[in-house]
Amino acid sequence: MCHAEVGKQVAGKAHAHKPAEGDCLQCHAPHASDHASALRLSPAELCVSCHQEVGKQAASASHPHGALTDARSCLNCHTAHASDHAKQLSRDTIGSCLACHNKPIVVDKARRVASVADLGNASMHKHGPIEKGECGASHAVHGGANAQLLVTPYPAAFYQKFTDEAYALCFKCHDRGLAVQATAEKETRFRDGTRNLHYVHVTGPTQGRSCRACHSVHASRFEAQIADTVAYGQWKLPINFTPTMTGGSCSPGCHKVQTYDRVTPIGMPPLPTTPEKPKASVR
């Protein structure tokens, strides 16, 4: 038998590809082919001949996933015969994404996809879906209609007037009350006494700040996904977040040092309607 190793792989892995368990000729030409590995069609064409819904999604995507557009296509993420990972991924979910996204990806002169290499750092706190290995909870992995392959539109602007539509992606998992209730207790730990500081920043009478203003969406040194810096125009402002047992403080470029405490309220002043001008030395 020539392809004994393939047979062992199919028999020994947790997730076998159904065609590989039966008739190899469903995918391979027995004598000759114009495609690598004697495939009957290119990887993309061959896969979508069975996985038609995925094919339709990829073909109609206004924002295609680059992993599907090169010659290897589906094989960039999936194994053809068998795998120990669900959906026949060649690695676990995070490992599959980091195979490409462990470094910045230059799309064109105007756009670059940032690295998410921190996902491989065991000391970093991961966003909930990522901790569960569910990148697909936020991203349309085969291509979609929204920037950054997000399953729901999410504003890129620093200032964002609150609407349910603008924050629909966040509310897939997070309690809406976290943003819309002026007072809170169990809904959030970001509060001064019962004054809900998410409401103050996002929904209150001053200009609403996007979640991106303070949070890292993938991984952070802090449990609450607090970012180290926030992009504001050409500036990268340090947030200088310091947690305490019952609250914390931050000293970003957009306002003076402010402290909050869930047990003994500090009495934080209202946020300014426009940020203070950053110091010129901060770049």
Image: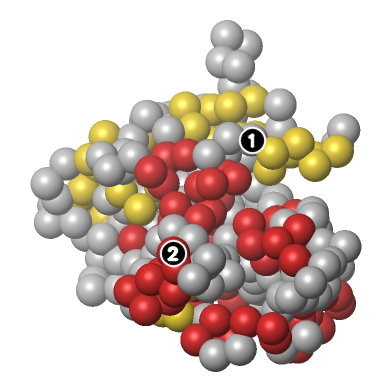
In this rendering, the answer to whether 28 lies above or below 63 is below
Q: Is residue 276 visible?
A: yes
Other residues around mark 2 within 10 Å, as few (<14) / some (14–19) / many (≥20)? few
Q: Residue furthest top?
A: 281
User: Which quadrant holds the C terminus?
Assistant: top right
Q: Secondary structure at mark 2?
A: helix
Residue 5, disc:
2
- Identify the residue at image location x=75%, y=66%: 38
Q: Secondary structure at mark 1?
A: loop
In this rendering, the answer to whether 212 lies above or below 16 is above
Q: What is the x, y in percent for residue 280? A: 62, 11
- Identify the residue at image location x=37%, y=29%: 240
Give, as a three-letter code, the residue at label 2.
Glu
Residue 130, disc:
none
Give, as a three-letter code, the residue at label 1.
Pro
Residue 104, disc:
1
**Which comes sooner in the sequence, label 2 or label 1?**
2
